[in-house]
Structures are given as structure tokens and as C-alpha cells.
Image (cartoon, rainbow, N blue to C red):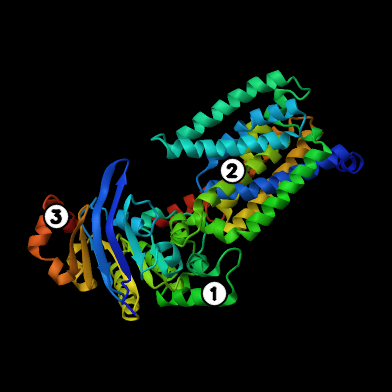
Amino acid sequence: MEFFHDILNYSFLQRALITSILVGIICGIIGSFIIMRGMALMGDAISHAVLPGVAISYMLGINYFYGAVFFGVLTALGIGFVTQNSRIKSDSSIGIVFTAFFALGILLIAKAQTATDLTQILFGNLLSVRPSDMWITVSVAIIMIVIVTLFYKEFLISTFDATMAQAYGLPIKWIHYSIMVLLTLATVASLQTVGVVLVVAMLITPASTAYLLTNRFSTMIVLASFIGALSSVIGLYISFEHNLSSGAVIVLVATILFIIAFLFAPKQGMIIKAFQSKQIQK
Amino acid sequence: MTKHYALEVKQLSVSYDGVSAIHDMTFCIEPGKLIGIVGPNGAGKSTMIKAILELIPYHSGSVRFFNKPVKQMRKQIAYVPQRNDIDWNFPILVEDTVLLGTYPKLGLIKRPSKKDKTFASQCLQTVGMYDYRHKQISELSGGQQQRVFMARALAQEADILFLDEPFVGIDIASEKMIVDILKKLRSEGKTIFIVHHDLSKVTTYFDDVLLLNKTLIAHGPAKDVMTPQVMSEVYNMDFQLFTESGDET
């Protein structure tokens, strides 16, 4: 109960709580699109590829957000360019582009020699969220919710049936790049919470849990956000009480929620499926 | 007033990575016809309709619908993809799938109204799938899935319809229902293109046939095109294969 007492007293904890809840929501929304579009690897790629942007931002003395977004978008464009202009398949070009940026980032971070070391960027540290970082996360959440609400129809149909979307004249390429930009924003907003290495978990684990629980895409987005936020809150609480790495604990909480859905989901769960196949055999 | 063709294709050629997929196709289609697009495997049937709809680029030729470029006609065209192009595990219910058909006319941002939803329900009733409206699309049989996509095309209220292999892997009752709906649409003046590979029913289903094999082999009334001579010429290599697969079903 000390945690709740401390939240009222320490602003750094309040910031950690707000930021982590928002990150859960942001990642739940964009993660739902990412997994249904079969782009989980893209989430991993962009989160790693923003590293040089973070380093350059430190060198220039600006908020790491700007550099990270720049490199995130550059990565999405780079991957698209390699895939479209060669016989290299999409997953390979993702691998080539993001590892190159990540490697560059490692060198630049060492050169930048900031107080923030590589470990913090790689694994996140919720308790060191500055007010400016929190406000960036708030802005990203607002942008995300507004855009997805306004263009839900277009995002839905281009995700479910891109050919029909294209046939009736939707600019599916632009929609793809908009989703890439939103993905980059989500990734950058998550850096402080879970770090570069584990961002992909926040993108795909809560969304996958939600996918097992519903047959409606709009419900899936809301559920994924809720599950993401819940993982964040529980994870922050446990990591604070037991002095553990916040990002790792949040991801493990999200994983436990996934396992519960995987086993017990009312329609898609393993147990109900095993039971149903037994019934059929009888 | 000059009479406009529903579709006018001139010297259409498409190639992938320098390999020609379809070559120099020219034909005109009058409105109010049910047209079968027929040809052996790899003849470029799907490629042709995708090129006509400008879903893939073509490197030469021109396509006009009612004497207008595709760009201006997109909202009057409905496209039903092949069944295996769809992710059936997508979290979407039958009723919401049909509602997608109302999207093209809504424009950006605007949400479907109550009227749109009622109309989508009517389309679902037309294909006899209203009772399944709360099912997720993977819970349906192949024929039911195709009927749902037929309902979605109906909800688009398009003047021109393209269906890519709609009868593959579906039951006879669903096939008959879809054919009846298409014939009714045709009698209302709509122009319908169907990519089809089951040769036995071509003459009963279609008014006209476009017979392809990398290029246009023949175009005309189904009975005139589907003669033994023409067929053996086009299906020469595949004829053995065709009878084998015919025996299986």
C-alpha cells in the first residue's frame, strides 16, 4: 500500500504512472493494426532503428523525440524502398535496414557521452521520466486517438481488404506510411517505459491478447489498450515495490495476461478448443 | 450522343520484371452484359482485371469505363477478390463485412449511418445470410463466405462488378444463388465480369466470353466462342489436366 501513498507524494511516480498508462493505450491502438497487417517485425525494426536519432538529439541538445521520429520514418521509407526496388523480400529488407541503423546508433551513443547511458535507452527507466517526456507521451496519445478515430473506416478496410480499398480509390500507400509514422511515434513514446529492446512486446503482446478475446476489430483496439494500460500499472507497482527493472516487469505482466487468454479465452482459448475437439470425437 | 461502351480496352499489355503477363488486348464491352473471363491457368485472367482496375500498373494501352478513366469511375465499380486473398481470421463480423460495401460512397471520415446499416442488412437478406450476421467470418462455410462478399458487392450499388473466381470451393446452392443474383443485376443493366475456370457451365452462365491465353484469343457470345476447335487450341497443353481435375470433383 506504500505505493499508493508514494504516488500522492512523489511527482516522479505520478509521471511514471501517467506515462506508462498512456504508453499501454498508444501501443494497444497501433499494435492492433500492426498485428493484423502482419507487420510485427516492423515494430521491432523501428524501435531499434531510432537509436541513432536518440544519440544525435543528445549531441545537438534537443529532446530525443525529434531525432527518433526522424530516424523512425527514414527506416520505414528505407525498408519500403529496398523491398520495392529489388527482389529482396520484405522481412529481409527489414532486417538489413534496422540492424544497420541500430549498429550506427550504438557507435553514436558511445560518442555522445551523455549521462544517459545505453542501458537506459535499451531497457527504459520509468522512474526517470521528465515532465517534458511525459508531455510528449500525452501529445502522442492525443494525436493517435484523434487520427485513428477520424480515419477508422479507412484504416479498417485497408487492413482487412487492401485490394477493395485500392479498387475504390483509397491511397493505400499513404495509409501505410501514416501507420508507419504512428508506429514510430508510439515507439518513441515507449522508449522511457520499456526501452528499445522491449517496445515490440508492448506493441504485439496486449494486441494479441485482445485478438484472442474478441471478434470485432474496434473492440480489439479498446481491449488491447486496456490490457496494455493494465500491464503498465501492475508492472510499475511490482517493479517499484521490489526494486526491479520496470520495462521488464511490465512486459512479463503483459505476457502473463496473454498466457491467461491463450489458455482460457472463451472461444479461442486452448482449453475450450481441446474440450470442443473431444466433444466432436465422441 | 454517341453510345458509350461500359468498358473499352485498347492494346493493354502488362509485364512483371520484364516478363510479359498479358499482351496487346483490345476489346469493347456493351453495358448490361454478364461476361465470363475464361482461360487456362496462368492465362493472365486475374492480371487482366487487376490491370483494368489499375490495381497493378500496365506498361501500355488504355482503359476507359463509359468513356471515362478508371479514376473517375472507382465508386461505380465493385471488386470481389479471390477467397484466398482474404484473411478469414480477421476480427470482423458478417454484418460489419457487408457494411464495408457502403464505405466507398461515404467519403473520408464520415461514418455509416443507420440508413447504411439497414441497407447492408437488406443486402445480407438478399443472399440469405441475415441469420449469420453476428458470426465471425471464419465460422462460415466457403459458400456462405462467398455469399457474404456478394452481399458486400451489392451494398456498393455499383454499375460494374468484377468477381475473381467466385465459384471456387463453394457449394452448389450458394453458386446457384450467386448466379441468380448476378443475372438479376445484369437484367437491371449492370455490367458484370467474372473470372471463371470451370468450362462446363460457361455457356449457361454468361452472355459473352473473353477467352484469354496471355492475349485475347476470342471474344463473343458464349456459344460461338466455346467451340471444340477453339477450346482444344487454347487448352491444348492443359486439356489432359483439365479432364483429370474434372474427374476429381
| Vertical arrangement, residue A56 with respect to residue A187, above or below | above
Q: Nearer the viewer, residue B108 or A125?
A: B108
Q: Where is A15 relative to A282, above or below? A: above
The answer to which image quadrant residue B139 occupies is: bottom left
Disc 3: host chain: B
Dot 2: element:
helix
Residue extending furthest toward the right = A9
Are tags 1 and 2 found on a single chain?
no
Q: Around disc 3, counting alpha carbons within 10 Å, would you say few (fewer than 14), some (14 to 19), or many (20 or more)?
A: some
Label 1 CA crowd tier, 10 Å (few <14, some 14–19, many 20+): some
Q: Nearer the viewer, residue A124 or B7?
A: B7
Q: Is residue B114 toward the left or the right of residue A225 in the image?
A: left
Image check: A125 left or right of B155? Answer: right
Residue placed at 46% from the left, 69% from the top? Answer: B132
- Residue position marked by numbered label 3 in the rendering: B235
Q: Position of residue B105 (x, y in %)?
A: 51, 70
Whether residue A264 can be seen here: no
- Read off the residue under disc 2: A204
User: In front of the other: label 3 or label 2?
Assistant: 3
Residue at the spot of label 1: B116
Task: Name the residue: 30% across, 66% down.
Answer: B8
Give coordinates of residue A16: x percent, y percent: 80, 39
Q: Quadrant of the N terminus of chain A?
A: top right
Q: What amino acid type should be assigned to the residue bearing mark 1?
A: Asp
Tell me: B89 left or right of A261.
left
Q: Label 3 amino acid?
A: Tyr
Q: Position of residue B102 (x, y in %)?
A: 50, 70
